[in-house]
Image (cartoon, grey):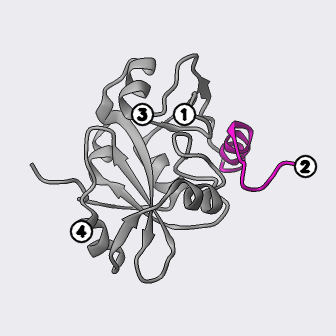
Amino acid sequence: MQDKRNLGIDDVRAFLRQSGLDSQIVELTDSARTAQLAAEAIGTSVAQIVKSLIFKGSQSGAPVLVLASGANRVDERKVAQVIGEPVKKADAEFVRDRTGFAIGGVPPFAHLEPMRTVIDEDLLTFADVWSAAGHPHAVVRLLPGELVSISKGQSADIKVSS
């Protein structure tokens, strides 16, 4: 039996199917662990890559999923304003324990537990976006509306202002 903390591509595929989405997972020969690597491997812009970042509520200890454009840095103060408490970046063990996925392969959905999700509003401006699909060598193409509905996230301006 698979350790519940070690989810992967098959779990993402099953979640997509159960959600009624026909999105195909693309398995890459090269790593898509970073937004830049993913964009190069797929042949798209870095801005269309969804970075799934896990933060931890400073008071509640609850996981917070931030879905950011690969071109943007996240302003933690803006995220805190959206969720109502300060956040700090979670470590790899916390990410694995709460999502079931390793950093670099965390999708925007299919986690071990539901979590508050904030979506970078810049992602909603594209015709399509690409996210990790359970492994650093796997990605999935989504429409912005699908990203919002499947992640149950709320969009907001969360990028660092230039």
Name the residue tied to disc 1: 140
Measured in 3D between alpha carbons, the distance from the residue under mark 4 to the one under mark 3, in whole angstroms, is 23 Å
Of the pair 26 and 41, the residue shown nearer to us:
41
Q: Earlier in the sequence, mark 4 or mark 1?
A: 4
Measured in 3D between alpha carbons, the distance from the residue under mark 4 to the one under mark 1, in whole angstroms, is 29 Å
| Residue at point 31%, 30% (across, down) | 46
| Residue at point 62%, 55% (across, down) | 96
Measured in 3D between alpha carbons, the distance from the residue under mark 2 to the one under mark 1, in whole angstroms, is 26 Å
Of the pair 34 and 12, the residue shown nearer to us:
34
Tell me where residue 159 appears, x and y as whole percent: 22, 53
Name the residue tied to disc 2: 1
Measured in 3D between alpha carbons, the distance from the residue under mark 2 to the one under mark 3, in whole angstroms, is 30 Å
Name the residue tied to disc 3: 34
Q: Earlier in the sequence, mark 2 or mark 1?
A: 2
The part of the chain drawn in magenta is 1-19
Q: Is residue 121 above or below residue 87?
A: above
* Residue sitting farthest toward the bottom: 59
Q: Is residue 95 above or below residue 137?
A: below
Name the residue tied to disc 4: 77
> Element under label 2?
loop
Q: Earlier in the sequence, mark 4 or mark 2?
A: 2
Task: Identify which amino acid the numbered label 4 is placed on.
Answer: Arg
